[in-house]
Image (tube, coloured by chain):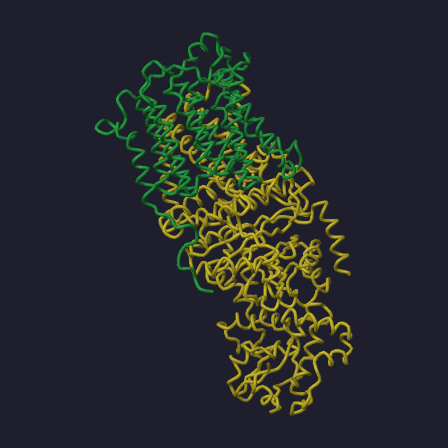
């Protein structure tokens, strides 16, 4: 509803300067029976009568405004619509591209409100503050501004508000996207990779090790080996226990069809979807097609394609797709570090939704995912900050690598994470399809732009703040890396991020223990620490073993007394055996794109030890990069799969239709 | 709708069954008073081992919803029987005891997996059975082979879940096969020959040594098993695990007559298997009503008390070995 005094103010005829000032004054009084918006749009030839009827029926079920429905369906261009809207309300329309807002009127404390409620202070003339607004019926606007006599309103396009806000507040958003967490909670930021006290302890440990090696090399190696073996043994057992728990059918937030059916569209909140992309123009249609299929009121979707300002090819490709107005392009200013979390932090400041999720460019979420998440949030209570959906791959059968990657992802998302959720242990989030309560996400400071696995870090930070992360039974299908080089680049980034996360959380081990409890602490060590240690120690376990096997050499016998030798061998053999078996279980638990079990991958689980060699290579690359270039974001190239071309053809057909 | 003011279900007095129970338990427990809790003639490490296993059993029953006092009473009964039984010198070596415990724990875990399958279905019981089979290396080969077959039959309906019979078998036997491979590898590396010793056919003299006659004293595991099975049958709780239990016992006895089967179970293995199997059946689906619990416990105590009379050397029977192999 238009603020009560707005018409009064409009009738004063003080429209500011420029085009608005030059425009002939509107009728000074509202007509007794103003024409309906739909009729105006038909009169203007912008929509057909059939479209209007469709939109009206959607409007009642979605509980949305007619204009939002029409825009969401892509039947109208925003500029044309808002001009008619202004006419409908007898308010002037302002084109912010021609008449930009006065930046000095912007209040940095209200930037979030500007984005959420789609308004901006535009000009100040003769003591009157002119506000441009995209939704003249907003109750919030009436409460916020309705009581003031020195305020007048005009209408503009929501996209123009977004781009104007970026023009004015962009540098501040960009600065905050990089440094906000480091200032808010430096103890949680990976801006400093290794703190001074950590350097001290590492130096003490290294010096101690060198000293011990020079004095008693055999005993030192035995001690190191024993500790390592014990840690790995517990890590394997922990993972086994997680899998066993997850194999029970009732684990995780399983949302039934009845629960989904009970949801009313009109009660659903606005949902922001961030799609950070960099130089990935080719896969854009896949994502657009997948998002269009989402079973969620489209007028309540706030989809932001988060692109780097200098990534012209993707920006041009996005514009060329002529997507409906629910898709907004956010251009992130060029700054360092050039990471996905920084881009997400920037876009988060422009989000309108109560909830927010992230999808990668090539993602294909299940259509009912957002609704399932809404049910899960309501079911899990107020301490839940995030819900993670399962991830899987649509090109699992392309080659050996994609098969192994699929098995690994299934192990992670279908077995490990649901069990962690069940046990209420901290969950390192996956890269995409994590759905946040936006208020809580802002409270913990958003993503860490210096951490290259910002998602895993964020999951653990939520635990540190006392929030819970859940896992929901909905799958997002992604493109598995089908080339070894690309895979190693991606995996090295993940392991580097895990090391960063471990280092950040272990700055104050007792603090972590206090925050997450001893169970959470142990889980963190065995799950996150175990991933790092197993990747790095694998060669040291395999190489001596192969040496023995092939040469039967006795050279290493002095370093490995018999009991240790047996424990090491059992660890290596049993560890690999368990990994093989757990991967087999993952194949049964996971679902392919037809929602059938991926059981044809089951025999491939026998080759898991080979996959672990690649994991170790990536681990050492990660360690090297952590020392030489800690914040460098190893970009994963998407769209290289053979399946992607088929997906693209389907998506293009869907877009055209 | 008004809130219910009391719990639904029959109103029972919780005192009188306990008094009767205590009255039944006293003749069994009293002999232990006034002396060391573990009689001097009992091998202490073995007794402690038995007590620890009974404590685990009590915990399992408690987790299954048996209730603290009842779990303690059942476990106490079993522990008493074990300790009294251990007074009898058995002339078994440590490896033989380890094998016996291995057999017992294996049977317990296998029956647990089957009861889990009967209760829930799905992949968890299947994975449990597969892992239990891998630990079957601790048991006697013939018992393992029987369970391998029973698993294939029992989990046959899950072939759809696994995507075909071949994949089901892969899912069921991979841990066991990997375990065998690992043991073979360890044997090769350390010249240990673990697999070989596990698979060795006992020489006739060895069989003769192990082939001990049993006394009434040794009959209590059989009584324990029978009472448990009957109790479950009467309570309408019998299912696949009971069938598996009976089949294992009967087939193992029958297979005694196949001469080429290596490392056959001896009476001690049988006793431990019988006790562990019955204990598992009790723990996985404990009697829920006080009356049922009381009747079963009373029967158990009575059967055990009868069998555990002091051995006087007169009641020797060949209860499992009626014929020479």
Residue A78: x and y in percent read 69, 73
Q: Residue pushed farthest top?
A: B205
Most foreground residue, A474 or A401: A474
Residue B164: x and y in percent read 67, 35
Residue A452 seen from this side: no
Counting the numbered discs, the total is 0
Q: Quadrant of residue A135?
A: bottom right
Quadrant the N terminus of chain A occupies = bottom right
- The green-coloured chain is labelled B
Residue A185 seen from this side: yes
Residue A523: x and y in percent read 44, 44
B176 vs B11: above or below: above
Most foreground residue, A142 or A134: A142
Residue A584: x and y in percent read 59, 36
Locate residue A97 relative to residue A578 in the image: left or right. Answer: right
Colour that chain A carries in the picture: yellow
Locate residue A648 relative to residue A489 in the image: left or right. Answer: right
Q: Quadrant of residue A219?
A: top left
Residue drawn at x 67%, y 72% is: A59
Most foreground residue, A158 or B205: B205
A385 vs A85: above or below: above
Residue drawn at x 54%, y 40% is: A621
Most foreground residue, A438 or B169: B169
């Amino acid at each position: 509803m238009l603020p009560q005094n707005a018409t009064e103010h409009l009738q004063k005829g003080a429209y500011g300067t420029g085009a608005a000032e030059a425009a002939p004054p509107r009728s000074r009084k509202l007509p007794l029976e103003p024409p309906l918006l739909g009729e105006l749009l038909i009169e203007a030839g912008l929509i057909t009568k059939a479209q209007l009827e469709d939109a009206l029926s959607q409007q009642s079920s979605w509980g949305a405004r007619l204009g939002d429905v029409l825009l969401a369906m892509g039947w109208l261009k925003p500029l044309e619509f808002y001009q008619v809207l202004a006419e409908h309300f007898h308010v002037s329309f302002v084109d912010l591209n021609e008449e930009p807002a006065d930046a000095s009127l912007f209040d940095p404390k209200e930037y979030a409100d500007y984005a959420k409620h789609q308004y901006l202070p535009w000009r100040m003339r003769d003591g009157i503050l002119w506000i441009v607004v995209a939704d003249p019926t907003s109750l919030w606007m009436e409460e916020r501004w309705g009581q003031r006599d020195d305020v007048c309103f005009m209408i503009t396009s929501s996209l123009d508000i977004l781009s104007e806000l970026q023009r004015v507040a962009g540098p501040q958003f960009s600065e905050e996207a990089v440094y906000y967490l480091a200032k808010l909670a430096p103890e949680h930021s990976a801006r400093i990779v290794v703190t001074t006290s950590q350097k001290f302890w590492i130096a003490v440990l290294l010096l101690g090790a060198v000293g011990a090696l020079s004095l008693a090399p055999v005993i030192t190696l035995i001690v190191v080996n024993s500790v390592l073996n014990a840690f790995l043994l517990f890590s394997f057992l922990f993972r086994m226990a997680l899998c066993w728990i997850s194999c029970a059918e009732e684990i995780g937030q399983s949302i039934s069809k009845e629960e989904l059916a009970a949801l009313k569209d009109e009660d659903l909140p606005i949902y922001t979807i961030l799609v950070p992309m960099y130089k990935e123009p080719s896969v854009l249609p896949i994502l657009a097609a997948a998002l269009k299929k989402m079973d969620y009121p489209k007028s309540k979707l706030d989809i932001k394609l988060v692109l780097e300002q200098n990534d012209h090819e993707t920006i041009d490709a996005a514009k060329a797709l002529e997507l409906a107005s629910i898709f907004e392009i956010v251009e992130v200013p060029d700054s360092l570090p050039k990471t996905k979390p920084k881009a997400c932090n920037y876009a988060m400041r422009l989000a309108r939704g109560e909830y927010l999720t992230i999808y990668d460019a090539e993602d294909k979420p299940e259509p009912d995912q957002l609704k399932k998440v809404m049910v899960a949030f309501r079911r899990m209570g107020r301490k839940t900050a995030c819900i993670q959906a399962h991830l899987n791959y649509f090109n699992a059968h392309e080659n050996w690598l994609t098969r192994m990657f699929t098995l690994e992802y299934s192990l992670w998302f279908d077995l490990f994470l649901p069990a962690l959720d069940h046990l209420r242990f901290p969950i390192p989030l996956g890269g995409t399809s994590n759905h946040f309560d936006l208020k809580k996400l802002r409270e913990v400071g958003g993503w860490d732009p210096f951490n290259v696995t910002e998602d895993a870090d964020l999951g653990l930070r939520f635990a540190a703040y006392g929030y819970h992360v859940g896992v929901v039974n909905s799958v997002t299908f992604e493109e598995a890396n089908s080339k070894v080089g690309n895979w190693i680049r991606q995996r090295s980034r993940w392991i580097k991020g895990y090391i960063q996360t471990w280092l950040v959380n272990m700055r104050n081990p007792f603090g972590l223990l206090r925050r997450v409890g001893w169970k959470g602490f142990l889980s963190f060590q065995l799950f996150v620490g175990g991933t790092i240690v197993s990747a790095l120690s694998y060669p040291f376990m395999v190489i001596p073993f192969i040496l023995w096997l092939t040469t039967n050499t006795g050279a290493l016998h002095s370093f490995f007394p018999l009991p240790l030798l047996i424990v090491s061998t059992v660890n290596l053999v049993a560890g690999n055996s368990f990994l093989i078996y757990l991967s087999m279980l993952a194949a049964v638990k996971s679902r392919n794109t037809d929602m059938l079990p991926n059981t044809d991958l089951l025999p491939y689980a026998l080759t898991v030890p080979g996959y672990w060699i690649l994991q170790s290579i990536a681990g050492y690359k990660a360690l090297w990069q952590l020392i030489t270039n800690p914040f460098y974001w190893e970009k994963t190239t998407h769209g290289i799969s053979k399946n992607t071309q088929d997906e693209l053809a389907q998506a293009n057909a869907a877009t055209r239709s | 709708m008004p809130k219910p003011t009391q719990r639904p279900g029959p109103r029972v007095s919780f005192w009188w069954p306990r008094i009767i129970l205590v009255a039944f338990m006293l003749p069994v427990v009293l002999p232990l008073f006034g002396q060391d809790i573990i009689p001097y003639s009992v091998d202490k490490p073995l007794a402690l081992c038995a007590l620890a296993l009974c404590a685990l059993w009590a915990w399992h029953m408690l987790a299954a919803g048996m209730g603290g006092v009842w779990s303690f009473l059942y476990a106490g009964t079993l522990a008493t029987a074990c300790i009294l039984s251990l007074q009898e010198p058995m002339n078994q070596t440590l490896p033989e005891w380890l094998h016996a415990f291995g057999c017992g724990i294996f049977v317990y875990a296998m029956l647990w997996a089957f009861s889990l399958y009967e209760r829930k279905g799905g992949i968890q019981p299947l994975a449990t059975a597969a892992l239990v089979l891998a630990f079957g290396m601790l048991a006697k080969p013939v018992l393992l082979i029987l369970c391998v077959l029973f698993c294939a039959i029992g989990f046959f309906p899950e072939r759809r879940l696994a995507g075909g019979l071949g994949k089901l078998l892969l899912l069921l036997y991979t841990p066991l096969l990997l375990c065998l491979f690992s043991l073979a590898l360890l044997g090769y590396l350390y010249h240990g020959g673990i697999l070989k010793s596990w698979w060795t056919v006992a020489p006739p003299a060895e069989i003769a040594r192990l082939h001990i006659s049993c006394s009434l004293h040794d009959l209590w595991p059989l009584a324990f098993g029978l009472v448990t099975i009957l109790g479950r049958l009467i309570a309408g709780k019998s299912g696949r695990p009971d069938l598996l239990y009976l089949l294992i016992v009967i087939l193992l006895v029958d297979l005694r007559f196949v001469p080429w089967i290596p490392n056959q179970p001896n009476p001690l293995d049988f006793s431990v298997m019988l006790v562990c199997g019955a204990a598992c059946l009790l723990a996985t689906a404990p009697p829920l009503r006080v009356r049922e619990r009381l009747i079963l416990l009373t029967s158990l105590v009575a059967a055990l008390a009868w069998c555990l009379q002091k051995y006087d050397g007169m009641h020797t029977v060949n209860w499992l070995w009626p014929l020479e192999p």
